[in-house]
Amino acid sequence: MVSEAARALAVRCEGRANSLARKLSREVFDSVPGYAQLPAEVKDLEIAATVRHGVRLFLRGVVHPPAAPDGYRLFRERAARRAEEGVPLHLLLRSYALGVHGLWQVIREEARPQESGAVAELVDLLLRAQTEVVGVVTERYLEEREALAAERASDGTRLVHRLLDGGLGPEDVRHADVDLAGPLLVLALGADHSAPADGPVGHRRRLRGLRTALGRVPGAGGFALLAEEPEGGDLAGRAVVSGCADVPPGLAAHLSEGYGATLYVAAAYARDPAGVPEAARTVVEVVRIARAGGLPAGRVHRLEDVLLEFHLSRPGPGSDSIAALLDPVGHRPELLATLRSHLELRLDRRATAAALGVHPNTVDKRLARLTALTGLDLSSPRGTALALAAQLLRETRRPAEGG
Protein backbone atom coordinates (compact mmCIF):
# COMPACT_ATOMS: atom_id res chain seq x y z
CA MET A 1 0.00 0.00 0.00
CA VAL A 2 1.14 3.53 -0.77
CA SER A 3 0.90 6.01 2.08
CA GLU A 4 -1.17 9.19 1.84
CA ALA A 5 1.98 11.26 2.31
CA ALA A 6 3.64 9.60 -0.69
CA ARG A 7 0.51 10.15 -2.80
CA ALA A 8 0.37 13.81 -1.85
CA LEU A 9 4.03 14.25 -2.78
CA ALA A 10 3.44 12.52 -6.12
CA VAL A 11 0.54 14.88 -6.93
CA ARG A 12 2.76 17.92 -6.33
CA CYS A 13 5.54 16.45 -8.47
CA GLU A 14 3.22 15.79 -11.44
CA GLY A 15 2.79 19.50 -11.95
CA ARG A 16 6.46 19.70 -12.96
CA ALA A 17 6.25 16.99 -15.65
CA ASN A 18 6.35 19.46 -18.55
CA SER A 19 9.27 21.50 -17.23
CA LEU A 20 11.22 18.32 -16.42
CA ALA A 21 10.65 16.99 -19.94
CA ARG A 22 11.91 20.25 -21.46
CA LYS A 23 14.96 20.35 -19.19
CA LEU A 24 15.93 16.74 -19.89
CA SER A 25 15.40 16.84 -23.65
CA ARG A 26 17.15 20.20 -24.15
CA GLU A 27 19.91 20.17 -21.53
CA VAL A 28 20.53 17.04 -19.48
CA PHE A 29 20.51 14.50 -22.30
CA ASP A 30 23.20 16.49 -24.13
CA SER A 31 25.72 14.79 -21.83
CA VAL A 32 24.91 11.46 -23.47
CA PRO A 33 27.41 10.71 -26.31
CA GLY A 34 25.63 10.89 -29.65
CA TYR A 35 22.49 12.64 -28.35
CA ALA A 36 23.43 16.01 -29.87
CA GLN A 37 23.50 14.43 -33.33
CA LEU A 38 19.85 13.36 -33.16
CA PRO A 39 17.37 15.35 -35.30
CA ALA A 40 15.75 18.28 -33.49
CA GLU A 41 12.24 16.88 -33.96
CA VAL A 42 13.29 13.66 -32.26
CA LYS A 43 14.67 15.50 -29.23
CA ASP A 44 11.99 18.19 -28.93
CA LEU A 45 8.96 16.09 -29.76
CA GLU A 46 9.41 12.36 -29.37
CA ILE A 47 11.90 12.24 -26.51
CA ALA A 48 10.23 15.07 -24.60
CA ALA A 49 6.86 13.37 -25.04
CA THR A 50 8.28 10.07 -23.83
CA VAL A 51 9.68 11.78 -20.72
CA ARG A 52 6.33 13.41 -19.95
CA HIS A 53 4.56 10.12 -20.45
CA GLY A 54 6.99 8.27 -18.21
CA VAL A 55 6.83 10.84 -15.41
CA ARG A 56 3.04 10.97 -15.44
CA LEU A 57 2.72 7.20 -15.76
CA PHE A 58 4.81 6.71 -12.64
CA LEU A 59 3.31 9.48 -10.51
CA ARG A 60 -0.30 8.68 -11.44
CA GLY A 61 0.42 5.04 -10.72
CA VAL A 62 1.45 6.09 -7.23
CA VAL A 63 -1.78 8.04 -6.71
CA HIS A 64 -4.12 5.54 -8.37
CA PRO A 65 -2.43 2.11 -8.50
CA PRO A 66 -2.14 0.00 -10.49
CA ALA A 67 -0.98 1.84 -13.60
CA ALA A 68 -2.78 1.21 -16.89
CA PRO A 69 -1.81 -2.23 -18.30
CA ASP A 70 -0.75 -0.71 -21.63
CA GLY A 71 1.24 2.10 -20.02
CA TYR A 72 4.52 0.77 -21.39
CA ARG A 73 3.27 0.67 -24.97
CA LEU A 74 4.78 4.05 -25.83
CA PHE A 75 8.15 2.92 -24.46
CA ARG A 76 8.00 -0.15 -26.70
CA GLU A 77 7.06 1.90 -29.76
CA ARG A 78 9.84 4.42 -29.17
CA ALA A 79 12.39 1.66 -28.56
CA ALA A 80 11.45 -0.01 -31.85
CA ARG A 81 11.72 3.28 -33.71
CA ARG A 82 15.13 4.08 -32.22
CA ALA A 83 16.31 0.60 -33.19
CA GLU A 84 15.10 1.13 -36.76
CA GLU A 85 16.88 4.49 -36.89
CA GLY A 86 20.11 2.93 -35.66
CA VAL A 87 20.28 4.82 -32.36
CA PRO A 88 22.67 2.84 -30.10
CA LEU A 89 21.04 0.98 -27.23
CA HIS A 90 23.44 2.48 -24.68
CA LEU A 91 22.28 5.99 -25.65
CA LEU A 92 18.66 4.96 -25.18
CA LEU A 93 19.24 3.36 -21.79
CA ARG A 94 21.36 6.27 -20.55
CA SER A 95 18.57 8.68 -21.40
CA TYR A 96 16.12 6.60 -19.36
CA ALA A 97 18.56 6.49 -16.44
CA LEU A 98 18.97 10.29 -16.59
CA GLY A 99 15.20 10.62 -16.71
CA VAL A 100 14.91 8.63 -13.49
CA HIS A 101 17.60 10.80 -11.91
CA GLY A 102 15.76 13.94 -13.03
CA LEU A 103 12.53 12.72 -11.47
CA TRP A 104 14.38 11.90 -8.26
CA GLN A 105 15.62 15.52 -8.17
CA VAL A 106 12.05 16.78 -8.56
CA ILE A 107 10.87 14.53 -5.73
CA ARG A 108 13.68 15.77 -3.49
CA GLU A 109 12.99 19.43 -4.30
CA GLU A 110 9.22 19.11 -3.78
CA ALA A 111 9.54 17.18 -0.51
CA ARG A 112 8.96 18.97 2.80
CA PRO A 113 11.21 18.34 5.81
CA GLN A 114 8.64 16.10 7.47
CA GLU A 115 8.18 13.95 4.30
CA SER A 116 11.41 11.94 4.44
CA GLY A 117 9.41 8.73 4.76
CA ALA A 118 7.34 9.61 1.70
CA VAL A 119 10.54 10.37 -0.24
CA ALA A 120 12.00 6.98 0.63
CA GLU A 121 8.73 5.33 -0.40
CA LEU A 122 8.66 7.07 -3.78
CA VAL A 123 12.33 6.33 -4.48
CA ASP A 124 11.72 2.66 -3.73
CA LEU A 125 8.81 2.62 -6.19
CA LEU A 126 10.84 4.61 -8.74
CA LEU A 127 13.72 2.13 -8.71
CA ARG A 128 11.31 -0.76 -9.17
CA ALA A 129 9.67 1.04 -12.08
CA GLN A 130 13.06 1.75 -13.64
CA THR A 131 13.83 -1.98 -13.64
CA GLU A 132 10.57 -2.68 -15.47
CA VAL A 133 11.05 0.08 -18.04
CA VAL A 134 14.67 -0.84 -18.79
CA GLY A 135 13.61 -4.45 -19.31
CA VAL A 136 10.74 -3.50 -21.62
CA VAL A 137 12.83 -1.05 -23.65
CA THR A 138 15.81 -3.38 -24.01
CA GLU A 139 13.67 -6.35 -25.00
CA ARG A 140 11.73 -4.42 -27.64
CA TYR A 141 14.86 -2.73 -29.00
CA LEU A 142 16.69 -6.04 -29.41
CA GLU A 143 13.61 -7.68 -30.96
CA GLU A 144 13.47 -4.93 -33.57
CA ARG A 145 17.19 -5.12 -34.27
CA GLU A 146 16.96 -8.89 -34.70
CA ALA A 147 13.98 -8.50 -37.02
CA LEU A 148 15.83 -5.90 -39.10
CA ALA A 149 18.94 -8.09 -39.26
CA ALA A 150 16.85 -11.10 -40.28
CA GLU A 151 15.15 -9.03 -42.98
CA ARG A 152 18.47 -7.84 -44.37
CA ALA A 153 19.89 -11.36 -44.21
CA SER A 154 16.79 -12.68 -45.96
CA ASP A 155 17.15 -10.08 -48.70
CA GLY A 156 20.82 -10.95 -49.07
CA THR A 157 20.03 -14.67 -49.10
CA ARG A 158 17.43 -14.28 -51.84
CA LEU A 159 19.81 -12.11 -53.85
CA VAL A 160 22.78 -14.48 -53.66
CA HIS A 161 20.66 -17.56 -54.45
CA ARG A 162 19.22 -15.85 -57.53
CA LEU A 163 22.68 -14.63 -58.50
CA LEU A 164 24.23 -18.09 -58.17
CA ASP A 165 21.36 -19.93 -59.82
CA GLY A 166 20.92 -17.58 -62.78
CA GLY A 167 17.64 -16.01 -61.69
CA LEU A 168 18.88 -12.43 -61.61
CA GLY A 169 18.09 -10.46 -64.73
CA PRO A 170 19.79 -7.27 -65.94
CA GLU A 171 17.04 -5.12 -64.43
CA ASP A 172 17.45 -6.84 -61.07
CA VAL A 173 21.20 -6.21 -61.22
CA ARG A 174 20.66 -2.50 -61.85
CA HIS A 175 18.31 -2.15 -58.88
CA ALA A 176 20.18 -4.38 -56.41
CA ASP A 177 21.13 -2.87 -53.06
CA VAL A 178 24.78 -3.86 -53.60
CA ASP A 179 27.14 -3.10 -56.47
CA LEU A 180 27.33 -6.27 -58.55
CA ALA A 181 29.91 -4.99 -61.00
CA GLY A 182 32.62 -7.58 -61.56
CA PRO A 183 34.91 -9.23 -61.20
CA LEU A 184 33.20 -11.43 -58.63
CA LEU A 185 34.90 -14.22 -56.70
CA VAL A 186 32.64 -17.28 -56.55
CA LEU A 187 33.31 -19.88 -53.88
CA ALA A 188 32.06 -23.35 -53.00
CA LEU A 189 32.72 -24.45 -49.43
CA GLY A 190 32.66 -28.11 -48.48
CA ALA A 191 33.31 -29.51 -45.02
CA ASP A 192 36.00 -32.13 -44.62
CA HIS A 193 34.70 -35.68 -44.05
CA SER A 194 36.24 -35.54 -40.58
CA ALA A 195 34.17 -32.50 -39.48
CA PRO A 196 32.03 -33.43 -36.48
CA ALA A 197 28.28 -33.76 -36.96
CA ASP A 198 26.98 -31.72 -34.04
CA GLY A 199 23.31 -31.32 -34.88
CA PRO A 200 21.19 -28.37 -36.04
CA VAL A 201 22.41 -25.99 -33.32
CA GLY A 202 26.07 -26.67 -34.10
CA HIS A 203 25.32 -26.41 -37.84
CA ARG A 204 23.73 -22.99 -37.40
CA ARG A 205 26.63 -21.87 -35.22
CA ARG A 206 29.16 -22.96 -37.85
CA LEU A 207 27.27 -21.12 -40.58
CA ARG A 208 27.09 -18.00 -38.44
CA GLY A 209 30.86 -18.15 -37.95
CA LEU A 210 31.36 -18.73 -41.67
CA ARG A 211 29.18 -15.74 -42.56
CA THR A 212 31.18 -13.55 -40.17
CA ALA A 213 34.48 -14.78 -41.63
CA LEU A 214 33.26 -14.07 -45.17
CA GLY A 215 32.46 -10.51 -44.15
CA ARG A 216 36.08 -10.13 -43.05
CA VAL A 217 37.89 -11.69 -46.00
CA PRO A 218 41.35 -10.08 -46.13
CA GLY A 219 41.70 -7.68 -49.01
CA ALA A 220 38.05 -7.87 -50.02
CA GLY A 221 35.78 -4.88 -50.43
CA GLY A 222 32.17 -4.34 -51.34
CA PHE A 223 30.16 -7.31 -50.14
CA ALA A 224 30.33 -11.01 -49.32
CA LEU A 225 27.10 -13.00 -49.60
CA LEU A 226 26.66 -16.59 -48.40
CA ALA A 227 24.11 -19.04 -49.74
CA GLU A 228 23.80 -21.59 -46.97
CA GLU A 229 23.26 -25.28 -47.65
CA PRO A 230 21.20 -27.74 -45.56
CA GLU A 231 22.84 -29.73 -42.81
CA GLY A 232 24.22 -33.08 -43.88
CA GLY A 233 24.93 -32.16 -47.52
CA ASP A 234 28.22 -32.09 -49.37
CA LEU A 235 28.45 -28.31 -49.12
CA ALA A 236 28.45 -25.87 -46.23
CA GLY A 237 27.55 -23.13 -48.67
CA ARG A 238 28.31 -21.15 -51.78
CA ALA A 239 29.43 -17.53 -51.72
CA VAL A 240 30.01 -14.49 -53.88
CA VAL A 241 32.65 -11.95 -52.83
CA SER A 242 33.34 -8.63 -54.53
CA GLY A 243 36.43 -6.48 -54.45
CA CYS A 244 39.05 -9.25 -54.67
CA ALA A 245 41.56 -8.85 -57.48
CA ASP A 246 42.76 -12.38 -56.72
CA VAL A 247 42.15 -15.11 -54.17
CA PRO A 248 43.34 -13.57 -50.88
CA PRO A 249 46.27 -15.35 -49.22
CA GLY A 250 45.18 -17.64 -46.43
CA LEU A 251 41.54 -17.61 -47.56
CA ALA A 252 40.88 -21.29 -46.84
CA ALA A 253 42.45 -21.09 -43.38
CA HIS A 254 40.52 -17.90 -42.60
CA LEU A 255 37.16 -19.40 -43.61
CA SER A 256 37.91 -22.71 -41.89
CA GLU A 257 38.65 -20.88 -38.66
CA GLY A 258 35.32 -19.09 -38.87
CA TYR A 259 33.49 -22.33 -39.66
CA GLY A 260 35.18 -24.19 -36.85
CA ALA A 261 36.30 -27.10 -39.06
CA THR A 262 38.59 -27.54 -42.05
CA LEU A 263 36.92 -26.63 -45.32
CA TYR A 264 37.46 -27.58 -48.92
CA VAL A 265 37.39 -24.26 -50.79
CA ALA A 266 36.99 -24.01 -54.56
CA ALA A 267 37.26 -20.64 -56.30
CA ALA A 268 36.49 -19.20 -59.71
CA TYR A 269 36.03 -15.69 -61.08
CA ALA A 270 33.10 -14.24 -62.98
CA ARG A 271 33.62 -11.06 -64.97
CA ASP A 272 30.06 -9.93 -64.34
CA PRO A 273 26.81 -11.23 -62.78
CA ALA A 274 25.92 -13.11 -65.96
CA GLY A 275 28.99 -15.32 -65.50
CA VAL A 276 28.28 -16.20 -61.87
CA PRO A 277 25.97 -19.24 -62.46
CA GLU A 278 28.55 -21.04 -64.63
CA ALA A 279 31.33 -20.22 -62.16
CA ALA A 280 29.11 -21.52 -59.33
CA ARG A 281 28.50 -24.82 -61.12
CA THR A 282 32.22 -25.19 -61.73
CA VAL A 283 33.31 -24.57 -58.14
CA VAL A 284 30.70 -26.99 -56.78
CA GLU A 285 32.11 -29.70 -59.05
CA VAL A 286 35.69 -28.81 -58.10
CA VAL A 287 34.82 -29.29 -54.41
CA ARG A 288 33.19 -32.65 -55.17
CA ILE A 289 36.24 -33.76 -57.14
CA ALA A 290 38.66 -32.54 -54.47
CA ARG A 291 36.82 -34.50 -51.80
CA ALA A 292 36.37 -37.59 -53.96
CA GLY A 293 39.96 -37.53 -55.15
CA GLY A 294 41.38 -37.22 -51.66
CA LEU A 295 42.90 -33.80 -52.30
CA PRO A 296 43.79 -31.92 -49.12
CA ALA A 297 41.24 -29.73 -47.39
CA GLY A 298 42.24 -26.38 -45.94
CA ARG A 299 43.41 -24.92 -49.23
CA VAL A 300 41.85 -23.26 -52.28
CA HIS A 301 41.31 -25.43 -55.34
CA ARG A 302 40.71 -24.13 -58.85
CA LEU A 303 39.55 -25.86 -62.01
CA GLU A 304 43.11 -25.72 -63.31
CA ASP A 305 44.21 -27.91 -60.39
CA VAL A 306 41.84 -30.75 -61.31
CA LEU A 307 41.48 -30.46 -65.08
CA LEU A 308 41.99 -34.17 -65.79
CA GLU A 309 39.78 -35.28 -62.93
CA PHE A 310 37.11 -32.76 -63.99
CA HIS A 311 37.11 -34.13 -67.51
CA LEU A 312 37.05 -37.76 -66.40
CA SER A 313 34.18 -37.19 -64.00
CA ARG A 314 31.85 -35.63 -66.58
CA PRO A 315 28.75 -37.79 -67.15
CA GLY A 316 28.32 -39.14 -70.66
CA PRO A 317 27.01 -42.14 -72.58
CA GLY A 318 29.65 -44.43 -71.08
CA SER A 319 29.88 -42.95 -67.59
CA ASP A 320 27.54 -45.47 -65.93
CA SER A 321 29.50 -48.37 -67.39
CA ILE A 322 32.80 -46.88 -66.24
CA ALA A 323 31.51 -46.23 -62.71
CA ALA A 324 30.21 -49.80 -62.60
CA LEU A 325 33.74 -51.14 -63.02
CA LEU A 326 34.18 -50.71 -59.26
CA ASP A 327 30.89 -52.36 -58.32
CA PRO A 328 32.61 -55.70 -57.52
CA VAL A 329 34.51 -53.97 -54.68
CA GLY A 330 31.70 -51.67 -53.57
CA HIS A 331 31.35 -53.69 -50.35
CA ARG A 332 35.10 -53.54 -49.66
CA PRO A 333 35.81 -50.02 -48.27
CA GLU A 334 39.43 -50.88 -47.53
CA LEU A 335 40.04 -51.61 -51.22
CA LEU A 336 38.34 -48.38 -52.32
CA ALA A 337 40.31 -46.36 -49.76
CA THR A 338 43.55 -47.95 -50.93
CA LEU A 339 42.70 -47.16 -54.55
CA ARG A 340 41.87 -43.54 -53.70
CA SER A 341 45.12 -42.99 -51.78
CA HIS A 342 47.20 -44.83 -54.38
CA LEU A 343 45.84 -42.65 -57.21
CA GLU A 344 46.21 -39.46 -55.17
CA LEU A 345 49.81 -40.30 -54.29
CA ARG A 346 50.76 -41.00 -57.92
CA LEU A 347 50.95 -44.79 -57.57
CA ASP A 348 53.63 -44.61 -54.85
CA ARG A 349 53.06 -47.80 -52.81
CA ARG A 350 55.21 -46.69 -49.86
CA ALA A 351 53.50 -43.29 -49.62
CA THR A 352 50.14 -45.05 -49.88
CA ALA A 353 51.10 -47.44 -47.10
CA ALA A 354 52.21 -44.54 -44.88
CA ALA A 355 48.97 -42.63 -45.54
CA LEU A 356 46.87 -45.68 -44.65
CA GLY A 357 49.05 -46.77 -41.74
CA VAL A 358 49.72 -50.24 -43.19
CA HIS A 359 52.72 -52.19 -44.53
CA PRO A 360 53.60 -51.70 -48.24
CA ASN A 361 52.99 -55.44 -48.75
CA THR A 362 49.41 -54.90 -47.57
CA VAL A 363 48.98 -52.25 -50.25
CA ASP A 364 50.28 -54.68 -52.88
CA LYS A 365 47.86 -57.39 -51.73
CA ARG A 366 44.88 -55.03 -51.74
CA LEU A 367 45.66 -53.71 -55.20
CA ALA A 368 46.13 -57.23 -56.51
CA ARG A 369 42.76 -58.20 -55.04
CA LEU A 370 41.14 -55.12 -56.61
CA THR A 371 42.61 -56.05 -60.00
CA ALA A 372 41.37 -59.63 -59.65
CA LEU A 373 37.82 -58.49 -58.81
CA THR A 374 37.49 -55.62 -61.29
CA GLY A 375 39.94 -56.38 -64.10
CA LEU A 376 41.51 -52.89 -63.65
CA ASP A 377 45.27 -53.25 -64.12
CA LEU A 378 46.89 -50.34 -62.29
CA SER A 379 50.27 -51.19 -63.80
CA SER A 380 49.07 -49.99 -67.22
CA PRO A 381 48.24 -46.40 -68.26
CA ARG A 382 44.83 -47.48 -69.59
CA GLY A 383 43.94 -49.37 -66.42
CA THR A 384 45.01 -46.43 -64.24
CA ALA A 385 42.96 -43.95 -66.30
CA LEU A 386 39.89 -46.21 -66.13
CA ALA A 387 40.30 -46.66 -62.38
CA LEU A 388 40.60 -42.90 -61.86
CA ALA A 389 37.54 -42.20 -64.01
CA ALA A 390 35.52 -44.92 -62.27
CA GLN A 391 36.43 -43.68 -58.84
CA LEU A 392 35.60 -40.03 -59.69
CA LEU A 393 32.31 -40.89 -61.38
CA ARG A 394 31.33 -43.08 -58.47
CA GLU A 395 32.20 -40.58 -55.73
CA THR A 396 30.99 -37.39 -57.40
CA ARG A 397 27.66 -38.85 -58.44
CA ARG A 398 24.78 -37.00 -56.76
CA PRO A 399 22.41 -38.97 -54.53
CA ALA A 400 19.51 -38.51 -56.93
CA GLU A 401 21.53 -40.25 -59.61
CA GLY A 402 21.95 -43.38 -57.50
CA GLY A 403 25.12 -45.28 -56.70
Image (cartoon, helix red, strand yellow):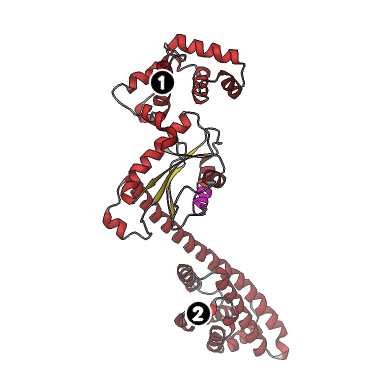
Secondary-structure class at tag 2: helix
**Residue bearing the label numbered 2:** 47
Question: Is residue 158 a member of the stretch shown in magenta?
Answer: no
Q: Residue at x 52, y 39 (%)?
A: 299
Q: How far across and how far down the image is residue 182, in percent? A: 37, 53
Type of amino acid under label 1:
Ala
From this view, report whether residue 289 is shown above or below residue 23: above
Query: Which quadrant holds the C terminus?
Result: top left
Secondary-structure class at tag 1: helix
Q: How far across and how far down the image is residue 294, in percent? A: 50, 29
Q: How far across and how far down the image is residue 133, in percent? A: 56, 71
Helix, strand or loop for the magenta stretch, by majority: helix
Q: Residue at x 51, y 52 (%)?
A: 217
Q: 264 or 82, which lies in front?
A: 264
Question: Is residue 209 a member of the stretch shown in magenta?
Answer: yes
Query: Which quadrant holds the N terminus?
Result: bottom right
Type of amino acid under label 2:
Ile
Q: How many marks?
A: 2
Disc 2 from disc 1: Cα separation: 76 Å
The crowd level at tag 2 (other Cα within 10 Å; few <14, some 14-19, many 20+) is many
From this view, report whether residue 137 is shown above or below residue 228: below
**Residue bearing the label numbered 1:** 385
Mark toward the start of the polypeptide (2 vs 1): 2
From this view, report whether residue 203 is shown above or below residue 83: above
What is the span of residues highlighted in magenta in the rendered image?
208-217
Q: How far across and how far down the image is residue 382, in percent? A: 40, 17
Q: State left or right for residue 361 relative to residue 288.
A: right
Q: 243 or 5, which lies in front?
A: 243
